[in-house]
Image (cartoon, rainbow, N blue to C red):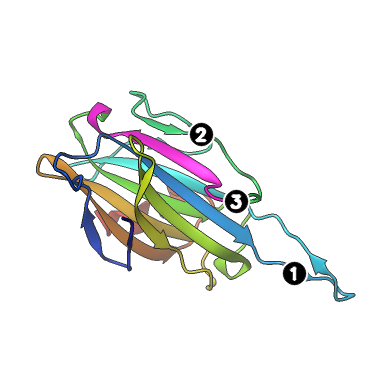
Amino acid sequence: MSISLQKGQKVSLAKPGGGTLTRIRMGLGWDAVTKKSRFGKAKPQSIDLDASCLLFDASGNLADQVWFRQLRSKDGSVLHTGDNLTGAGEGDDEVINVDLQGLPANVVQLVFTVNSFTGQDFSQIQNAFCRLVDESTGQEIARYDLSGAGQHNAQIMAKVSRDGDGWSMTAIGATATGRTFQHLLPAVATHL
């Protein structure tokens, strides 16, 4: 059973039958809004959204990052499956896989961000979402529908935090401005 998250809502990632998740997949999907040409015909556009996973230690220091220019964390526990430049296709357009048990002990939070590398704002994006999937079963655990309207070109989507012996996910949904995760770090810091 999937939970549709609202901004700021937190959900435990404990399995319904007990135990905690060991492998998760964060999927990002989107479509570009169809524009009308000068002659009234529908004109498709390409928007390059990029999903990133930022790994933080207990002091709020960036320990590692996974994004389109570094598809794998230094220890191999986080893997980005590749950059989608257009959002074309159904389902997840970009995927980041996380082995929660394989994360270094000093990593206590993962923050997932999305930004428009090509610079278009989110008013030109529709059907945008991020979702968390239990990799062992393929079942969607939580989904956060991203706001498609706005003059921002980036969003801090969600964070996954150590919660005792397990993990929890918090939907953040904070708008930001920046073409790569580096531009988003000051805004991300306020959510750690």
From mark 3 to mark 1, how far is it between C-alphas? Answer: 20 Å
**Mark 1 element type:** strand
Q: Quadrant of residue 46?
A: bottom right
Q: Which residues are magenta?
A: 91-102
Residue at far top of view: 75
Q: Which residue is rendered at x = 11% and y = 39% of the image?
A: 165
Q: Which of labels 3 and 1 is toward the front?
A: 3
Q: Amino acid at mark 1?
A: Lys
Horizontal side of 44 relative to 47 (left or right) equals right
What count of labels does the image hold?
Answer: 3
User: What residue does disc 2 label?
Assistant: 81
Horizontal side of 91 relative to 13 (left or right) equals right
From mark 2 to mark 1, how far is it between C-alphas? Answer: 29 Å
Residue 156 forms part of the magenta stretch: no
From mark 3 to mark 2, how far is it between C-alphas? Answer: 16 Å
Disc ID at residue 90: 3
Q: Amino acid at mark 2?
A: Thr
Q: Amino acid at mark 3?
A: Glu
Q: Position of residue 54 (x, y in %)?
A: 36, 42
Q: Quadrant of residue 74?
A: top left
User: What residue does disc 1 label?
Assistant: 35
Q: Earlier in the sequence, mark 3 or mark 2?
A: 2
Which part of the image, by quadrant, shows the N terminus?
bottom left
